[in-house]
Amino acid sequence: MNIDKTNGSSFIQSYQKQMQVSKVDKAKPLQKEDQLQISNEAKQMFESKAEFDRHEKIQALKAQVQSGDYQVNSEKVAEKMFDFWYGK
């Protein structure tokens, strides 16, 4: 009976070569992150428009409350509370 011995070291060497993969530097991001820049003029335009709209809504609500025409929609209030507490 003749048993052929194969050289096991060649298998180990090929495995070790596969394991010697160069490591990737994980500190550097592979892609740049998106950035958004809004000019100061655009910010001022947005703030003035939003403030004007808000002021109009507040004045309209005050007028309704003072005249007695303001009515609370209980269904909307309940729906908003439900959405808030149950995350919908």
Image: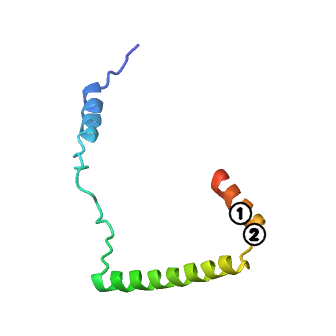
Side of 25 relative to 38 (left or right)? left
Q: Is residue 74 above or below residue 36?
A: above
**Distance of mark 2 from mark 1, alpha carbons?**
6 Å
Q: Which residue is mark 2?
A: 73
Badge 1, how many Cα within 10 Å: few under 14, some, many 20+?
A: few
Which numbered marker is on residue 14?
A: none
Which numbered marker is on residue 77?
A: 1
Q: Which quarter of the rendered picture does the N terminus lie within?
A: top left
Q: Amino acid at mark 2?
A: Asn
Q: Is residue 7 visible?
A: no
Residue 36, quarter of picture: bottom left
Q: Is residue 63 visible?
A: yes
Q: Secondary structure at mark 1?
A: helix
Q: Amino acid at mark 1?
A: Val
Q: Which quarter of the rendered picture does the C terminus lie within?
A: bottom right
Q: CB under 8 Å between callouts 2 and 1? A: yes
Residue 16, quarter of picture: top left
Q: Secondary structure at mark 2?
A: loop
Q: What residue do we see at 63% from left, 56% from top?
A: 84
Badge 2, how many Cα within 10 Å: few under 14, some, many 20+?
A: few
In-front residue for pair 71/41: 71
Q: Is residue 13 above or below residue 70?
A: above
Q: Position of residue 68 (x, y in %)?
A: 72, 77
Q: What residue do we see at 23% from left, 40% from top?
A: 20
Question: Quick one: which residue is furthest to the top in this view?
Answer: 1
Q: Position of residue 32 (x, y in %)?
A: 28, 66
Residue 77, quarter of picture: bottom right
